[in-house]
Amino acid sequence: MIRLVIADVDGTLVTQEKILTKEAVAAAQELRDGGITLALTSGRPPRGMQMLIEPLKLDGQIAGFNGGVYVNPDMSVVETHLLPPDVAKEAMKLILDKGLDAWLYTPDEWLIRDKDAPHVAREAWTVKFEARVTPTFPEEALAKAAKIVGVSDDHARVAECEKAAQDTLGERASAARSQPYYLDVTHPNANKGDVVMTLSKLLDIPTQEIATIGDMPNDVLMFKKSGMSIAMGNASDEVKRQATSVTASNEENGFAEAMRKFVLKGKKS
C-alpha cells in the first residue's frame, strides 16, 4: 500500500511548456482523497516550485535542489544541505574548465555570468524569478552554495563533465544530469535517493510504502530507494529499465495515468 508519492517536476509533473494540466491537478486531488501524501523534488530551488503549491493543494514537503533545501508547503525551511565551500570552488572550476557555462544557486539567490547565455531566459520563466548577473562568483556566494549547475547544449560534453565531476569530487558531492543540458552539483546528501530516506523519516512512512516518479537519470537514485518506482514515457530506455512501471509521457498526462493505474489502484485494492 502506497502512502507517499514523491514526484519529480520537469519532464514529469508538468509538460514540456511547464504547464500543470487539469488532469495532473485532478490526480493530486484523488491522491488526497485516498489518504496519500504528495511531495515534490526537483533540481529547481524551492521558490521555483512555489507556484505549484496552491493548485496541487500540496500537503507534503518540497525538496528543492534535489534535496539541498527542504521546505514545508508554507515555505518554512525544514532542513538544509549546502556544498562545503572548498568543494563548491573545485566544482565551479571543473565545470568552467570543461567549457560549460556555470550557474550558482544559494538558498536565496540565483547567480549567472551572462543574462543572454543559453537557457537563462527559459529558466527565469520556469522558476518565476530573475537571476543576479555577476562576472565572477563571489566567495560569500560559494560559501553558501546549494547547487552549482553546468550548462551546455553540447549534451555529450555535459555527460563527459558529469563523469569527470563524479570521478574528481567522489563522495564529497552529488553530480548528476537533471536535463541533457544541465549538470547539477549538490551536497552529497542532496540527491534524490536521500530525498526518499529523508521524507520517509520526516513523515514516518516506510520506504516500501513510497512511490517515486520521474524521467531523468538522477531520478533513478530515488527509484532504487522506494517500494514503487514509475518512469515517464519520455524517459530514456535506460531510466525505464530501472523502474518497476512505465507510464505515458508528460505530454500525454503520464503523471495522472500513473497515479490512477498504479498508485490509486493499489490503494483501492
Image (cartoon, rainbow, N blue to C red):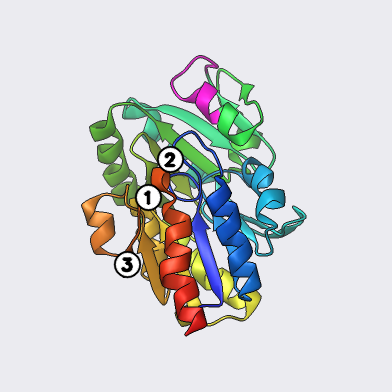
User: Which residue does the image show at 41% across and 71% down from the upper left?
Assistant: 262
Looking at the picture, how far across and down is residue 123, in whole percent? Answer: 53, 30
132 is within the stretch colored magenta: no
User: Which residue does the image show at 29% across and 50% down from the upper left?
Assistant: 167
- Which amino acid is tagged 2? Ala
Dot 1 or dot 3, earlier in sequence: 1
- Between 182 and 2, the one lying in front of the other is 2
- Name the main secondary structure of what is drawn in magenta: loop
Can residue 225 be seen in the rendering of this structure? no
- Between 166 and 29, the one lying in front of the other is 29
**Count of all numbered marks drawn on residues in the image:** 3
| Residue hosting label 3 | 245
| Residue hosting label 2 | 91
Asked if the residue under mark 3 is in contact with the one under mark 2, i.e. CB atoms within 8 Å, the reply is no
Residue 111 found in image quarter: top right
Q: Which residues are magenta?
A: 114-123
* 2 vs 3, front mark: 3
Secondary-structure class at tag 3: strand
